[in-house]
Amino acid sequence: MALNPQYEAIGKGFVQQYYALFDDPNQRASLANMYNVESSFMTFEGTQLQGSVKIMEKLNSLRFQKINRIITDVDSQPMFDGGVLINVLGRLQTDEDPPHAFSLGIHDTV
């Protein structure tokens, strides 16, 4: 399979859409559509989760009221399976907690 020449646009578009849904409590449930029922994986602060149901349970269990995120970089790489490997770096603050660095790695199968 060929490398996807639109990998940068795909990566940036995915990140923009993902965080628009995540940051809106009324739309957060729509994130389930971005995860596969069985083959999506997430590690969140040391806890490994598999499948869209478990991932959404974790995301819905987060109890912050406010979130402020500054994305400092989105690096995307084409994959030989036609997908895109996306790495997001930034700073995150929830409620009145101090801001801290975060990273997110995603393999988007397009």
Image (cartoon, rainbow, N blue to C red):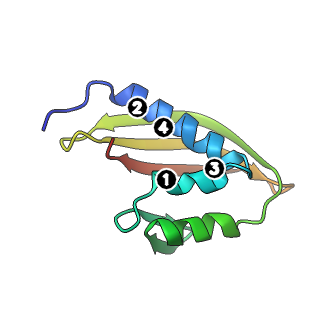
| Residue drawn at x 12%, y 38% as measured from the top left | 1
Q: Is residue 3 left or right of residue 77?
A: left
Q: Which mark is residue 24?
A: none
- Above or below — where is 2 with respect to 43? above
Q: Mark 4 to mark 2: distance in Å?
A: 6 Å
Contact (CB < 8 A) between labels 4 and 2? yes
| Residue 62, image x, y percentages | 71, 65
Of the image marks 3 and 2, the number of the one nearer the N terminus: 2
Secondary element at image label 2: helix
Quadrant of the image occupied by residue 51 = bottom left
- Amino acid, disc 3: Ala
Residue behind mark 4: 14
Q: Which residue is mark 3?
A: 101
Residue 97, given in percent of the width and then of the height, sits at: 82, 57
Q: Amino acid at mark 4?
A: Phe
Residue 73 is left or right of residue 93, and the answer is left
Q: Which residue is the site of mark 1?
A: 33
Mark 2 surroundings within 10 Å by alpha-carbon count, few (fewer than 14), some (14 through 19), many (20 or more):
many
**Residue type (three-letter) at the residue carrying disc 2:** Ile
Q: Which element type, helix, strand or loop, lies under badge 4?
A: helix
